[in-house]
Image (cartoon, rainbow, N blue to C red):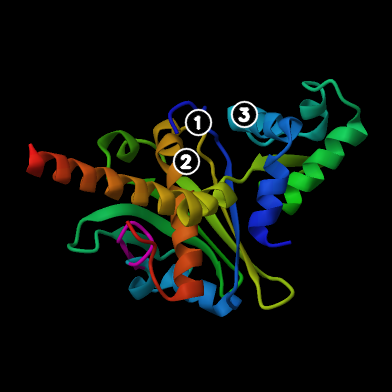
């Protein structure tokens, strides 16, 4: 799987998107904190966090005895820069073309 | 990212098809930074205690100032950070930026930026929150394709 595939796979699940939203609200959380906000077993949360980590969307760091989970927005930015921008630019240029055509014939 | 609460520790990570030495050069040489870091020129000797300055590409205006805390080329660079481009961030205390460069298998290098000690600098925390993703995306694109990001 390519890097992009891993990111799309990780984002294709509502629980994992929910986990990212929780980290977006407050970053640097322990597994126990994240688990307390989900109706799910610790094992289930761990499994989802691992998939997010494999995609690079979550990065863990040790702080003393704790393992903290951080949201890493860079993979989403890469998809934005490589995919979304491309199509958005094209759409904008079509609109710009349409505008100039319509204004010329008006 | 205005809806995000300001985070006192922010972590950004990216995998780049390049060597640790190439990543180090991209971080420490102005001919690279002007092409992905908001057009800024880096200026520092990268020795502990030396100033870390980020200058506007087309002039001598200092946009970020700081001091090199630790330097271990091509593995790690740690420096303080004060954003001078905005009067509100300029009046906040220094925060800290750590660049970690780790070689991976298959000719890939993992670059992690940790921007922390932002507890007393909420405006800076808000200001850099979207910026680092853009910078690292641009750095990856530059090293892998030789071209800066469009737009």
Which chain is home to disc 2? B
Residue B36: x %, y % from top left: 38, 63
Residue at point 37% right, 36% down?
Answer: B92
Q: Is residue B135 left or right of residue A76?
A: left
Region rendered in magenta:
B35-43
Residue B17 occupies quadrant: bottom right
Label 2 – label 3 distance at C-alpha: 13 Å
Residue B26: x %, y % from top left: 45, 72
Q: Which residue is mark 2?
A: B129
Q: Mark 1 packing: few (<14 Cα in 10 Å), some, or many (20+)?
A: many
Q: Which residue is at the front of the view, A5 or A65?
A: A5
Q: Is residue A43 left or right of residue B61?
A: right
- Specify whether disc 2 shares its chain with disc 3: no
Residue at point 22% right, 43% down?
Answer: A98
Residue B74: x %, y % from top left: 58, 75
Residue B46 appears in the figure: no
Q: Quadrant of the N terminus of chain A?
A: bottom right
Residue at point 81% right, 34% down?
Answer: A31
Q: Mark 3 packing: few (<14 Cα in 10 Å), some, or many (20+)?
A: some
Q: Which residue is mark 3?
A: A26
Q: Secondary structure at mark 1?
A: loop
Predominant SS of the magenta segment: loop
Residue B69: x %, y % from top left: 51, 60
Q: Pick whichever of labels 2 and 1 is earlier in the sequence.
A: 1
Tell me whether circle 2 and circle 1 mark residues in contact (CB < 8 Å).
yes
Q: Secondary structure at mark 3?
A: loop
Q: Secondary structure at mark 2?
A: helix
Tell me whether circle 3 and circle 1 mark residues in contact (CB < 8 Å).
no
Residue B111 occupies quadrant: bottom right
From the viewer's perspective, is residue B93 above or below residue A93? above
Q: Which residue is mark 1?
A: B6
């Amino acid at each position: 799987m390519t890097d992009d595939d891993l990111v799309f796979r990780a984002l294709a699940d509502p629980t994992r998107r929910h986990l990212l939203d929780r980290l977006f609200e407050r970053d640097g959380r322990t597994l126990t904190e994240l688990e307390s906000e989900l109706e799910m077993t610790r094992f289930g949360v761990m499994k989802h966090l691992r998939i997010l980590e494999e995609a690079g969307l979550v990065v863990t760091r040790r702080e003393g005895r704790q393992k903290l989970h951080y949201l890493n927005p860079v993979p989403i930015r890469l998809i934005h820069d490589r995919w979304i921008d491309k199509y958005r630019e094209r759409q904008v240029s079509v609109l710009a073309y349409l505008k100039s055509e319509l204004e010329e014939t008006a | 990212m205005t809806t995000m609460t300001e985070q006192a520790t922010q972590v950004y990570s990216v995998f780049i098809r390049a060597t640790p030495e190439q990543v180090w050069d991209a971080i420490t040489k102005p001919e690279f930074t002007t092409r992905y870091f908001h057009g800024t020129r880096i200026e520092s000797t990268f020795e502990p205690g030396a100033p870390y300055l980020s200058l506007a590409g087309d002039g001598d205006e200092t946009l970020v100032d700081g001091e090199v805390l630790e330097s271990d080329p091509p593995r790690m660079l740690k420096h303080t950070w004060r954003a001078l481009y905005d009067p509100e961030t300029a009046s906040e205390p220094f925060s800290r930026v750590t660049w970690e460069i780790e070689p991976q298998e298959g000719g890939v290098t993992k670059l992690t930026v940790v921007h922390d000690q932002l507890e007393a600098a909420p405006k800076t925390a808000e200001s850099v929150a979207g910026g680092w993703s853009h910078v690292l995306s641009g750095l990856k694109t530059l090293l892998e394709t030789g071209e800066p990001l469009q737009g």
